[in-house]
Image (cartoon, coloured by chain):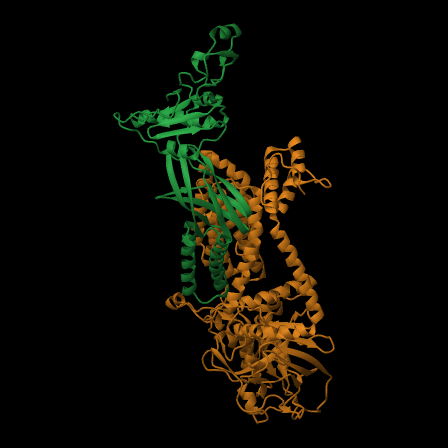
């Protein structure tokens, strides 16, 4: 009887293997035998009748288990995870091959759920979500068929098909309800958990903008997928890659502090000041710019998806900002040439749109000597000794009269070529800046930016670390670029002799973009669209929950408006839905007819014109039809007549239509 | 309706509790939360679906035909099912006992199910209610619903096979002194199971090499009787009842009126009719009497034809 259940358990096990495969933690070569044993389960399990086969199988499982445990306990944390996942799917394969009188399938269901749970931690990407959707349907169908076969009574194929059909509705309902509860249930998104507190687990940090850069923050970084900004060039051309949102001027050896001192236009000013225009836009001109030559400007349409982030991303050479639909949002300038956003409680929208005019090159500003000193200051403690040696080495390689761009480019190139990129929490990540400069550990963009800033300041080049967004991913929807939270980035701006700031990014660009991906083909674009949707789930937090609730609350009004505007379309849709519901209702009311038609088909007969069910039955009785199918046909005719006329067929009755 | 957690459901609940503990122990994770919600939703949906299934089900009628002891027989349940329902297990509730019926994989519409009643001992049980239970869809909960439906479950003695053939010929018990009819031999025919040994025509048998029996003229002048004398022990009564039951059940094909007599009972059984329910109930409940009890009453009978 379990034979009817076996295909469903087989699919479930294959999905478990796919879950593990998707994590990319386990090598494909290790999983291949398990794939093979799973696919071969319908044949292999027949061997379990013989004792020697059972002994060989169980012995093999025990040996593999022992090897995995030994490997896990001797090869470090990463391999422990790998071995754990292999063990989990090995259990599934073992159970699948032993389902029968001695082994009930309960454990397969539970283990399957556990595999989904565990892999969600290591592959929380779109592929996992697709697999989970399939898994939900497979699990529900398997559970339902299990209920039918569990009683041990004969279950025919029609009942199993009916259960599977029912399972589609149940699984859909379960997923929809789960989604609704996921959005609506209030919860603490920042909860650390008592185990983490007890063990001193630092938890994880999400990539994004921060008001300070803490280099000693060793928490693993999660690269979020949620869209932060969408940028489109008015002329359809390329979009600048570095969009700055905050600048850090002061470093104490472990932390970078933001450059906020002094209002724009003061003697400490480091960037051309912004002036508010009568039309509400902001424009800036270079103060003391030698020659004051104008360069061609390009315009970019920017949609900032989260105004509560509080910072307005702009390219360094931005010359004008034109806010659009700015209700509830107020801009305030900052000394580094950027803006902060102040939002009111009744801010109408969660997105803020603005146009940016960008010049070909940043404009120069007259910087005082005291300001220059501020941007070359280094703490007495906290600068690794390696940095001093490295700075001297780099400077010695340059001509004595090398200017700031040359010095900066040399240091940036050296770091790009000689230091590895990695994220906190990954194996081989540097434990501190000294290790990174020494080359014994990899570092992320904050390490590269800090290292470059230190190297430059040690060579008396004024510079600052800048935080913002790296815009590199094509946006298939409007031809611009899309910036996600994982694209948060840090780089360096160095002040040249002529008063212009230079953008220097020492982080190996290839590594960054390889990790952060980019859409190229329509397939990539479609996949990216789905990833956007999935990122809403993975990156769901209190703010998004509030947004969703707001959207849901506004939905009736919005729908009413749209319905009024599209009344003919709505009427046609309602008519179509009504027709479909009517047809479905009719089908539901006549299951006996449906079953009768199926029984006729199963018997290999076709209805003749004007032939009544009883006439057909007589024809079937006279023919050579398999007993089971003939019996089914008899039952179907009886049911049909009972449904339609309230009494079953009996011998001697005349034909009815 | 009553709800009960199944073994699978109990295991699932333990797993969910363990996952919840793990969730609370670690820092918040969206996917962890999502999966826990999915598991909880699956359980609640399963419960709601099972309740909905049984709410759509009505047991309209219960028919338990009399049947022999220690043999399965069909019980007819007439159901009205508004939507397709899966995995229905029915139980007959009797006085102090529950009789499970085989599970039905799926059912829909107005239908009558013929479910095998498990073999029962001789006796009469009164069914108080029919109970339906389902574990569908996920097997985590078992939901039960009860319909009070009274029915009498008569389990008469299993008919003695050796006498059934003789009884079918309409002449009562094969052990009777004149069970095959009159003494007038109408002809010869092949021997049938149940024919009395004294009716074997030995010469013809020897000649033809196959058993041949005498076919007697029907006894038109006498009304045979099945007499059960209950005086004696239970061990003596049971085979007597089995023989009598075989004869009674064969009355449907009888051509002559037959009497059934015992202590305190005298029934005239019309030919060609099924055994009356009253008589089957009596056979199901008959008990032995002490040896000094009066013999079966002869008063209404013109003559005794049979003594079982």
Quick one: A113 or A371, which is closer to the camera?
A: A113
Quick one: B186 or A491, which is closer to the camera?
A: B186
- The C terminus of chain B sits in image quarter: top left
Q: Is residue B86 visible?
A: yes
Total numbered badges shown on the rendered structure: 0
Q: Is residue A33 visible?
A: no
A215 on left or right of A639: left
User: In the rendering, at what x and y percent does residue A407 appear?
Assistant: 61, 79
User: In the rendering, at what x and y percent does residue A132 appear?
Assistant: 55, 57
Q: Colour of chain B?
A: green
User: In the rendering, at what x and y percent does residue A75 appear?
Assistant: 45, 55
- The N terminus of chain B sits in image quarter: bottom left
Quick one: B259 or A188, which is closer to the camera?
A: B259
Quick one: B9 or A90, which is closer to the camera?
A: B9
Write down the quadrant of residue A33 in the picture: top right
Q: Is residue A261 above or below residue A591?
A: below
Residue ID at (30%, 24%) = B295
B106 on left or right of A243: left
Q: Is residue B179 above or below residue A571?
A: above
Furthest-left residue in view? B292
Q: Colour of chain A?
A: orange
Residue ID at (71%, 91%) = A291
Q: Is residue A505 above or below residue A538?
A: below
A131 on left or right of B259: right
User: In the rendering, at what x and y percent does residue A124 appear?
Assistant: 54, 62
Residue ID at (62%, 49%) = A590
């Amino acid at each position: 009887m379990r034979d009817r259940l076996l295909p469903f358990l087989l699919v479930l096990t294959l999905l478990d293997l796919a879950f593990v495969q998707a994590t990319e933690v386990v090598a494909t070569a290790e999983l291949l035998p398990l794939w093979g044993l799973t696919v071969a389960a319908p044949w292999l399990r027949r061997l379990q009748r013989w004792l020697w086969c059972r002994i060989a199988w169980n012995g093999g499982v025990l040996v593999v288990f022992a090897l995995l445990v030994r490997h896990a306990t001797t090869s470090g944390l990463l391999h422990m995870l790998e071995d754990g996942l292999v063990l989990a799917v090995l259990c599934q394969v073992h159970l699948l091959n032993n389902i029968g009188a001695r082994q009930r399938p309960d454990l397969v269901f539970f283990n399957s759920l556990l595999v989904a749970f565990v892999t969600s931690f290591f592959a929380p990407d779109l592929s996992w979500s697709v697999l989970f959707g399939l898994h939900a349907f497979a699990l529900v169908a398997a559970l339902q068929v299990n209920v039918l076969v569990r009683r041990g009574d004969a279950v025919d194929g029609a009942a199993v098909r009916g259960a599977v059909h029912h399972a589609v509705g149940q699984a859909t309902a379960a997923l929809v309800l789960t989604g609704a509860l996921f959005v609506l249930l209030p919860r603490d998104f920042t909860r650390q958990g008592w185990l983490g507190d007890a063990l001193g687990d630092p938890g994880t940090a999400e990539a994004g903008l921060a008001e300070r850069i803490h280099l000693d923050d060793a928490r693993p970084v999660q690269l979020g997928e949620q869209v932060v900004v969408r940028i489109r060039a008015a002329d359809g051309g390329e979009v600048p890659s570095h969009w700055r949102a905050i600048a850090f001027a002061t470093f104490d050896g472990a932390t970078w502090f933001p450059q906020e001192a002094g209002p724009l236009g003061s003697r400490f000013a480091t960037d051309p000041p912004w002036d508010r225009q009568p039309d509400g836009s902001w424009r800036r001109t270079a103060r003391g710019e030698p020659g004051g030559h104008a360069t061609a400007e390009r315009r970019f349409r920017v949609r900032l998806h989260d105004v509560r982030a509080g910072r307005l991303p702009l390219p360094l050479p931005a010359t004008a900002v034109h806010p659009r639909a700015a209700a509830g949002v107020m801009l305030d300038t900052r000394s580094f040439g950027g803006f902060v956003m102040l939002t009111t409680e009744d801010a109408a929208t969660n997105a803020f749109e603005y146009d940016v005019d960008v010049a070909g090159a940043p404009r120069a500003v007259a910087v005082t000597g005291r300001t220059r000193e501020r941007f070359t200051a280094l703490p007495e403690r906290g600068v690794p000794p390696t940095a001093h040696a490295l700075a001297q080495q780099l400077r010695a390689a340059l001509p004595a009269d090398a200017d700031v761009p040359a010095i900066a480019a040399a240091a940036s190139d050296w770091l790009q070529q000689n230091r590895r990129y990695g994220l906190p929490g990954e194996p081989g990540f540097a434990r501190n800046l000294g290790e990174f400069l020494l080359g014994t550990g990899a570092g992320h963009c904050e390490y590269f930016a800090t290292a470059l800033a230190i190297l430059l300041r040690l060579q008396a080049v004024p510079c600052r670390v800048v935080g913002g967004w790296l815009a590199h991913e094509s946006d298939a929807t409007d031809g611009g670029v899309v910036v996600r939270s994982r694209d948060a980035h840090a780089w360096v701006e160095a002040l040249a002799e002529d008063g212009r700031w230079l953008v220097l990014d020492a982080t190996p660009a290839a590594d960054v973009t390889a990790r952060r991906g980019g859409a190229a083909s329509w397939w990539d674009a479609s996949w990216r669209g789905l990833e956007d949707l999935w990122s809403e789930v993975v990156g769901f937090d209190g703010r998004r929950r509030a947004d969703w609730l707001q959207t849901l609350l506004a939905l009736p009004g919005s729908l009413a408006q749209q319905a009024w505007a599209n009344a003919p379309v709505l009427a046609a849709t309602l008519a179509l839905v009504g027709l479909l519901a009517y047809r479905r209702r009719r089908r539901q009311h006549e299951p006996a007819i449906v079953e009768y038609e199926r029984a006729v088909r199963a018997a290999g007969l076709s209805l003749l014109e004007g032939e009544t069910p009883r006439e057909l039955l007589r024809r079937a009785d006279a023919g050579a039809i398999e007993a089971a199918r003939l019996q089914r046909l008899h039952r179907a005719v009886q049911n049909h007549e009972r449904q339609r006329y309230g009494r079953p067929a009996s011998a001697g009755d005349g034909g009815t239509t | 309706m009553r709800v009960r957690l199944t073994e699978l459901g109990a295991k699932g609940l333990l797993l969910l509790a363990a996952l919840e503990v793990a969730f609370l122990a670690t820092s918040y994770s969206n996917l962890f939360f999502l999966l826990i919600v999915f598991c909880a939703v699956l359980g609640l949906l399963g419960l709601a679906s099972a309740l909905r299934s049984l709410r759509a089900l009505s047991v309209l009628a219960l028919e338990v035909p009399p049947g022999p002891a220690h043999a399965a027989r069909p019980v007819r349940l007439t159901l009205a099912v508004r939507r397709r329902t899966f995995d229905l297990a029915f139980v007959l509730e009797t006085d102090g006992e529950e009789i499970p019926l085989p599970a039905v994989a799926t059912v829909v519409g107005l239908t009558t199910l013929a479910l095998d009643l498990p073999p029962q001992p001789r006796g009469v049980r009164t069914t108080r209610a029919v109970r339906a239970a389902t574990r569908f869809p996920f097997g985590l909960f078992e939901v039960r619903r009860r319909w009070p439906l009274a029915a009498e479950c008569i389990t008469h003695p299993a008919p003695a096979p050796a006498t059934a053939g003789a009884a079918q010929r309409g002449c009562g018990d094969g052990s009777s002194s004149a069970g095959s009819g009159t003494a007038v031999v109408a002809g010869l025919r092949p021997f049938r199971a149940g024919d009395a040994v004294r009716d074997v025509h030995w010469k013809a048998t020897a000649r033809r090499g196959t058993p041949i029996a005498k076919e007697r003229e029907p006894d038109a002048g006498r009304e045979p009787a099945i007499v059960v004398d209950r005086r004696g022990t239970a061990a003596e009564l049971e085979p007597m009842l089995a023989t009598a039951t075989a004869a009674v059940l064969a009355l449907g094909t009888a051509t002559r009126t037959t009497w059934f007599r015992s202590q305190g009972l005298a029934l005239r059984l019309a030919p060609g009719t099924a055994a009356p329910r009253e008589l089957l109930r009596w056979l199901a409940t008959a008990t032995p009497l002490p040896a000094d009890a009066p013999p079966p009453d002869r008063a209404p009978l013109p003559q005794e034809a049979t003594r079982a």
